[in-house]
Structures are given as C-alpha cells and as structure tokens.
Amino acid sequence: MQSYGYNEFTKYLQNWTAAQGSGGTSVAIGGSNTMGSWVDLFGATLDEDGYGIHIKVQNSHTSGSNRPILIDIGMDTAGGTSYTVLIPYLGVAGPLDGGGTSWRSAMYYLPVFMPEGSRIAARAQTSYGTPGTTQIRARIAMGPTNPQFVRCGTYVDAIGADALNSVGTEYTPGNNTDGSWTSLGTASREAWFATMGLINASSSATNNFFVTDLAVGDATAKQLLMERLQCGHSSQIATVWNQYPEQAQHCVIHDGDELFVRGNEPGTPDSNYTAIAYLVGGQ
Amino acid sequence: MGRLATRHNVFLAQQRNWTANDFGSSITPGASDANGSWVDLFGNTTDEDSWGIWLTFTSGSGSNTDTLCDIGVDTAGGTSYSVVIPNLIAGYAAAVASTTTLARTYFFPIFIPKGSTVAARAQQGLSTVVSFKLRCRLLQKPTHPELMKCGTFVEDIGTNSTTSKGVSITPGASKSWGSWTSIGSPTRDAFYWHGEIGIASARGQNYLADWGVGDGTTFRTLLEAQTVGTGSGQNSAEWIPAAWRYATLPAGAGLYCRIQGGDGTLDPCYGAIYVVGGFGGV
C-alpha cells in the first residue's frame, strides 16, 4: 500500500533573477589541475535549511578545445568563508551558454542537507591552458511541509574522479553496442542515492550523442543504477551535456561496493570518455 | 527542522521503450487538431505494476508544431485505451539528438497495473504533420511502496484541443515580468503538478516563468524563475527534480503563470499545468 502523505517544498532559493544575461555566479577556474578560489554562490547565508541542490554549469566552452572542469561545492555552516567540500568534483566538459539559448551544459541534482545560516560556495579546476571562468546556476529547495518524507544526506563521494587531470575514469563506448564495463572504483561509505557525471575530454566529437549505464556489483553480476543516461556532444563543439538527469535515483550501496560504467555510441566512438559516480549518504 | 526520513524507496526494475541509440516510439499526429491513431509504446504488456512514468518528447523538426499528446492505458492488455495523461504539450521540442535544446521531459507519479498496455496518440495544428519520437520509462518494483505517493489520474489545465496549444501568456519585455495569467483550476484534489511552456517559432531568446496558486491578486509560489531556453524554433524549460513538484492543490485552486522575456524580440508563449491526484497502488 502506498503512502498517504507526501512532502511539499514551499520555498526555493536560486542565484539568478533575469531572463537574459549571465544569470548565476561566475567562478574563476584554477589552472594546472589546481582548484581556484571559492566563490560565494548566493551572496548571503541560507535563511532556512536547504534540502537538496540543483546545479547547472555553463558558459565555459572554447570551440575545438579540450576543456574539462571539476567543480567543488563547499559549505561553511557558520556562515563564514571557511568552506568544507560538500560535493566534490562535479564534472563538466566545455559547457556552452545554457542560460541563454541552449541547454548544452551539465546538470546535477543532489539531495544534501544544508543547515540554516550556512554559506554555499563553488570552486573549479581545469587542465586547459587558458582556465577562464565558468558560470554556475544553483537552486536549493527549502521549507518542507513534511520533512519525515524527505531523505537528505550529509556527504557526497565522487567515485572515479581523476583530480590530477580534471577528468573522470576513462571508458570506451561500443560502436552501436554496449562497451565493456569499466570500474570507477569502490564506495568508501554507505550511500543511498547515485548520479553520474560524464566528461568527454576531447577537442572534437563525431556523433551527436551517446549513452552510458552506471551499475554496482562485481565482475560477474551488476545491478543497474542509471540506465542509458544520454549525453550530447557535437562535431562543432567539444562539450557534453546531461540531457536526462532524472535518471539519478535512490539505491542501496554499501562500503566496498564497486561502481562500473559502460557506454554505447551510434557510430565509431571518439576518444577520452570519462565518468564519475556521485554517491550521497549520511543522514 | 523536523525529523527527516531514515528510509527511502528504490525501484528495482524499469521498463523502457527505447534502446541505446533510438529515441523511442515514432508518433504521427493527426492533422488540423484532430487526434491521430494510438501507438503501443512497448509492444507488449507491462511486466510489473508501475509507480511512475517518465516521458520524453523529441521532434523531427523545429518548425511550427503545436502538438498535444495523450497517454492511454488499457489495464486489460488490449487496445481499448483510456486516456490517463491528457494533452501533454509535445511540440517545439528539441530535434532528435539536438545539439541545441533539451527534449521535453515529464514525470508523473501515477499507478499503472501489471499487464496493462500503454499507448500514445497526438494531435497537431499543421495540415501536413510532423512526426515526433516519444521515450517512455516506467518505474517498477519499489522496495518501499509505503513511502510512495502515487495517483490514478492526471488532469490537464489550460490546454486547448481546438488549437493544440495551451493558454496564451504574454511575456514581459526587456527582463520585466508580464502579468500573472490564469491557467485554470483542477476539478479534483491534486498533490503533484507540472507546468509546461510552449513557445512558437522560438528564435534563441531566454525566458523565466513563475508558477503560483492564488486568486489573481495574492499568490503562493509553486516555483520561481524557471528558466525556459529556446533556439532554432525549439524550446524547453529548466528541468526540475520530481521531488520538488509535490504540492497540495485542492479542487478549484487558481493556477497562474507569468513570464519574463529577455531583451530581444519575443515570441508567442503559451502554458499548461498538469496535476496528479487520486490514490493509486492500493
């Protein structure tokens, strides 16, 4: 029998107000695979508890260039600027102008708890020789009517991140077939929510899209966590965008569980596909 | 802060109508605002009880494609479909494998019993129609159904089957807000909502949409500043997590939308809201 109740979020906080123009917060990217400085995303502390954050990264694309970026989301629960990493290594590859005319940018949703009075910030790194800036749009859900229906975590682990090169773990999609499973690594803590980021760290792309599966298991048996996550990339622009982030979902992951990815491309795959799994845990 | 949940539901199975490199079922709309034929989305009955349905529309062309789509179910597994999700705005969606815009995506927490067939049909304003693709994913085998809130119906509010559009909403120009526009009211109590914006012949502008419940003067915000991106005749709205769409909407509640446009030339906008109610999965 299903639930009689449900939760409604009555308030949202977002860091943009206008229909055109930049929208969101500009973050200077650190070069040489070193994180840059923290940038306050909202310009103020949270006036209520936050129960999940939706992140969209955009405006950091250079045509024909390999521009992978890793982004940390940090939080200072005291409201200052001594940030602790809450969400590590969100991966993007040359996201375009998503605030303007397109949605060619990476999106992430993570159900993490952010207490009232916290300050939320972001920092970024890249291997690209001209780091520049990226733009981050963030929206936080607040004011739950029935928090007993809200599952919210206190930490996020990034499995498969390669911070030395600002990418994820490399895997090779099959040509019109599923490629081999590639291990991203193992979970170091219990987790109950999973999502995935993809970075095609290449300066060009042949096809328009590819799909990737995320699974947990071992060499012989796997349980799919995300199935056929579709990402776009283009021959004109070297970027990857998560077209269907709704596939992120609740799961059960134990300390020591191994995460895997495999891909499928409608044609000869390009090179340098990388993936990172993000696992939310805690209470 | 109240006590948060310590458990969660996991869906152990999904059923989808697409493989790796296609975009689901091809749907040919009826012309001139008439419904076309039903298309079975899965080619067989549902494997398990389903507790939610994801729908993603991609179009074959970004040209003028005012399109509404029904989702039908025959719980007996035949072809006598009853409409369970009416008149989804499906037009002006991103072309298949678009490099510009997101496809139109909907999620509805409704219950579809095991052994059902699920189908789609559509109507379009054109006299020479443009087909589109529809991907469908059913969420099945919940580990904790007692944590799920699931409905039995979806009600469309603001759609116009004589034009294959929604309610006309005039956007404010130059980053100012247009007026709150009434979309309509649900005729039954609801607990979940999805607002959708269609923009005809969009030319690469950016818009924001506010959604609210009210009386025309005073509003309770459902969602603020939802970004609506456009490009090459296509448009799509900022994806919102399904968990953020639950809201108590009693029968008769006034549902409204207002739109802010950017600095350039604005295109005609229209909107509709879809609400979920009922008590499914018992």
Image (tube, rainbow, N blue to C red):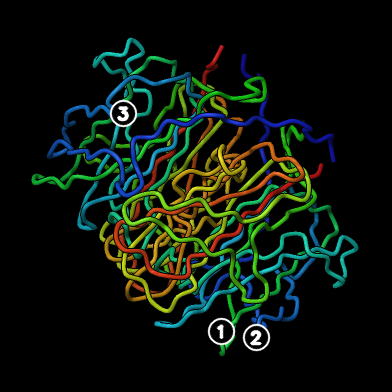
Position of residue B122 in the picture relative to residue A260 (left or right): left
What is the spatial separation of the Cα atoms under label 3 and label 1, in whole angstroms? 45 Å
**Contact between labelled residues 2 and 3, with CB atoms less than 8 Å apart:** no
Please indicate whether residue B236 sits to the left or right of residue A47 in the image.
left
Picture coordinates of residue A151 (x, y %)?
73, 38
Residue at left 46%, top 73%? Answer: A96
Say which amino acid is labelled 1. Tyr
* Residue occupied by mark 2: A31
Q: CA distance from mark 3 to mark 2?
A: 49 Å
Nearer to me, A106 or A49: A106
Tell me the number on the disc at residue A128: 1
Say whether residue A147 is visible. yes
Question: Regarding mark 1 in the picture, which secondary structure is present there?
Answer: loop
Residue B121 vertical placement versus B89 (above, below): above
- Mark 3 — on which chain does it sit? B
Instruction: Tell me the subunit letter for badge 1.
Output: A
Of mark 2 and mark 1, the one earlier in the sequence is 2
- Callout 3 touching callout 1 (CB < 8 Å): no
Residue A147 position, x and y percent, is: 76, 35
In the image, residue A17 sits, relative to residue B277, either above or below, namely: below
Label 1 Cα crowd, 10 Å radius (few <14 / some 14-19 / many 20+): many
Residues at marks 3 and 2 on the same chain: no
